[in-house]
Image (cartoon, grey):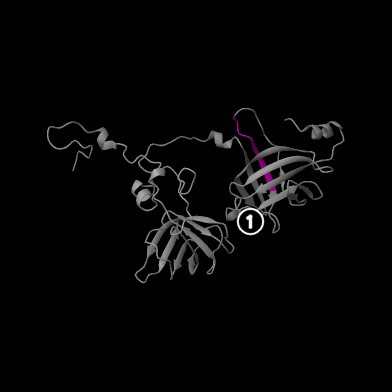
């Protein structure tokens, strides 16, 4: 590993003042800094706190496309990484950076690792997290699937639809909640039934603020009340009065893209691809050879 010249010169003196520092950036925007030095370090706009109980094991790095992995160990505490935040998934996929830094002159430093949080294990008041390097995604299979339904995710750069367009989302206060998974609303904006199925459910306030779930069912009762059910419970409790945002869902069919979102120019599926019946069809002297089912 090559270091910046000033840091390399400091390392070459033989009498160094070097410490480790880590920065963890969660997807909700919160950023935390840790160091194994006995004093606070500040650089790159981040305050690295000592006595956090977070340490790192030896980093395994290689050349080529091999995955660089490490582990970090830390104590669960109320002012640093809390157990309830881990259970809520707030650290899932969090970005992590690690430096060697001259604590006597923090301008002399070297970034030695950059990656994301992987699997987190906890117990006995402590946690262990796997750190995955930047080469980790290169080991995943990628490619386009030829399928009648759209392969894009609603609102991503391929879909290009603005999910917060008026008429396609609702912000409303929670009225009743069951197991952080089933939500009922007595009063609701005038949206068609099942409008939000397969859409996003984001908590905007309260203990679960920032958490996102996927809507499984969206049903309207005879009295006009609305029931929203998620595929799985959120990682933190949601209370009556908390604000949530519901975003319209997409089942990725061509008809839905055209009629519901008026976005068919960006449809990323293949609705006219021949099916299995077409592949097994054969010419006949009567009837219409339209590629339809042989058995009607």
**Which element carries disc 1, helix, strand or loop?**
helix
Q: Let me know if residue 200 is in the magenta part.
A: no
Residue 288 position in % (x across, y down): 16, 37
Corner quadrant of residue 203:
bottom right
Quarter of the figure with residue 10: top right
Q: Nearer the viewer, residue 264 or 185?
A: 264
Task: Work out whether 32 lies above or below 132.
Answer: below
* Badge 1: residue crowd in 10 Å (few <14, some 14–19, many ≥20): some
Residue at position x 19%, y 35% from top? 289
| Quarter placement of the C terminus | top left
> Which residue occupies 41% across, 56% down?
197
Left or right of 120 on screen, residue 101: right
x, y percent for residue 183: 46, 64
Split into 4 quadrants, where in the image is the N terminus? top right
Residue 71: x %, y % from top left: 66, 42
First to last magenta residue range: 65-73
* Residue under numbered circle 1: 83
Which of these two is toward me, 218 or 129? 218
Horizontal side, residue 290 vs residue 235: left or right:
left
Residue 276 percent coordinates (x, y): 28, 36
Q: Nearer the viewer, residue 96 or 164?
A: 164
Question: Which residue is outermost to the top?
Answer: 64
What residue occupies the far left of the structure in this picture? 286
């Amino acid at each position: 590993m090559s270091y910046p010249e000033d840091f390399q010169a400091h390392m070459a003196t033989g009498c160094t003042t070097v410490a480790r520092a880590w920065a963890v950036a969660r997807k909700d925007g919160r950023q935390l800094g840790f160091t194994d030095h006995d004093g606070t370090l500040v650089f790159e706009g981040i305050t690295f706190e000592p006595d956090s109980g977070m340490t790192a094991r030896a980093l395994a790095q290689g050349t080529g496309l091999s995955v660089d992995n490490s582990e970090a160990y830390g104590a669960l505490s109320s002012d640093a990484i809390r157990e309830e935040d881990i259970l809520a998934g707030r650290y899932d996929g969090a970005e992590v950076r690690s430096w060697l830094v001259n604590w006597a002159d923090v301008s002399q430093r070297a970034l030695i690792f950059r990656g994301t949080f992987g699997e987190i294990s906890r117990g006995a008041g402590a946690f262990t997290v796997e750190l995955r390097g930047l080469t980790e995604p290169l080991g995943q299979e990628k490619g386009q699937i030829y399928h009648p339904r759209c392969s894009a995710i609603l609102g991503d750069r391929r879909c290009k639809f603005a999910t917060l367009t008026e008429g396609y989302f609702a912000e409303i206060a929670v009225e009743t909640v069951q197991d952080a998974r089933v939500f009922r609303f007595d009063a609701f904006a005038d949206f068609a039934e099942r409008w939000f199925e397969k859409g996003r459910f984001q908590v905007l306030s309260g203990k679960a603020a920032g958490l996102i779930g996927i809507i499984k069912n969206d049903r309207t009762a005879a009295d006009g009340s609305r029931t929203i059910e998620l595929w799985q419970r959120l990682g933190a409790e949601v209370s009556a009065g908390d604000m949530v945002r519901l975003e319209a869902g997409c089942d990725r069919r061509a008809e839905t893209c055209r009629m519901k979102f008026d976005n068919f120019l960006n449809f990323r599926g293949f609705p006219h691809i021949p099916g299995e019946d077409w592949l097994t069809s054969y010419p006949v002297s009567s009837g219409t050879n339209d590629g339809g089912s042989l058995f009607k």
